[in-house]
Image (cartoon, grey):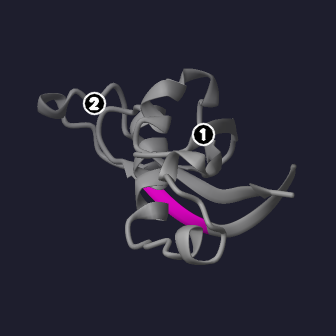
Amino acid sequence: MVRKRLIIEMGMGIDQHGQEPTVAASRAVRNAIAHNALPGVWEIAGLSHPNEMIIEVQVAVPYPEQVREEEVLAVLPFGRKSLTVESGGMIVQGRAIPELNDKNDEMLIAIAAVTVLIENE
């Protein structure tokens, strides 16, 4: 079987309060897929179920070692999913608000690329 890319979508996510890289990464993935319809998986690729799609996610975020991968992948409703997390994104100076559980003044920004692939012969 040969894997072929069908679509690549990019997104950005921010955790303004709480300093959770998982939150920023999940929001970036959600942003990447938020406005997609993929009729081509049925009409062109001939898949019979959305779980036949292969979905490769790349996320760049501060503190990548703290990302809870299963939570990021849970944003995707279907597919055979994989995630690569790397150091990147941005840290922007914000304002710590104790009532919002801030640990410091950092706002974390993540970027994501979500690639949908299909397998065919």
Which part of the image, by quadrant, shows the C terminus?
bottom right
Residue under the point 62% across and 31% down: 64
Say if the magenta span includes residue 114: no
Q: Secondary structure at mark 2?
A: loop
In the figure, residue 71 lies in which quadrant?
top left
x and y percent of residue 51 in the render? Answer: 52, 45
Q: Which mark is residue 119?
A: none
Question: Of the residues shown, which amino acid type is indicated by label 2?
Answer: Asp
Distance from Cα at disc 2 to Cα at disc 1: 35 Å
Q: Which residue is mark 2?
A: 102
Question: Of the residues shown, which amino acid type is indicated by label 1?
Answer: Arg
Q: Is residue 2 above or below residue 46?
A: above
- Is residue 15 left or right of 56 when viewed as pictured? left
Say if the magenta span includes residue 10: yes
Q: Secondary structure at mark 1?
A: strand
Q: Is residue 83 above or below residue 91?
A: above
- Specify start and end residues of the magenta stretch as a single range: 9-13
Residue density around tag 1, few if under 14, some if 14–19, many if 20 or more, within 10 Å: some
Q: Is residue 5 above or below residue 64?
A: below
Q: Answer whether residue 19 is visible to the viewer in this image.
A: yes
x and y percent of residue 67 in the render? Answer: 53, 27
Q: Which residue is mark 1?
A: 80
- Which one is earlier in the sequence, the residue at label 2 or at label 1? 1
Q: Of residues 103 and 81, which is closer to you in this image?
A: 81
Residue density around tag 2, few if under 14, some if 14–19, many if 20 or more, within 10 Å: some
Q: Tell which tag, 2 or 1, sits nearer the viewer.
A: 1
- Is residue 112 left or right of 36 when viewed as pictured? right
Q: Residue furthest left?
A: 99
In the figure, residue 87 lies in which quadrant?
top right
* Predominant secondary structure, magenta span: strand
Q: Is residue 29 above or below residue 105?
A: below
Residue under the point 39% across and 73% down: 35
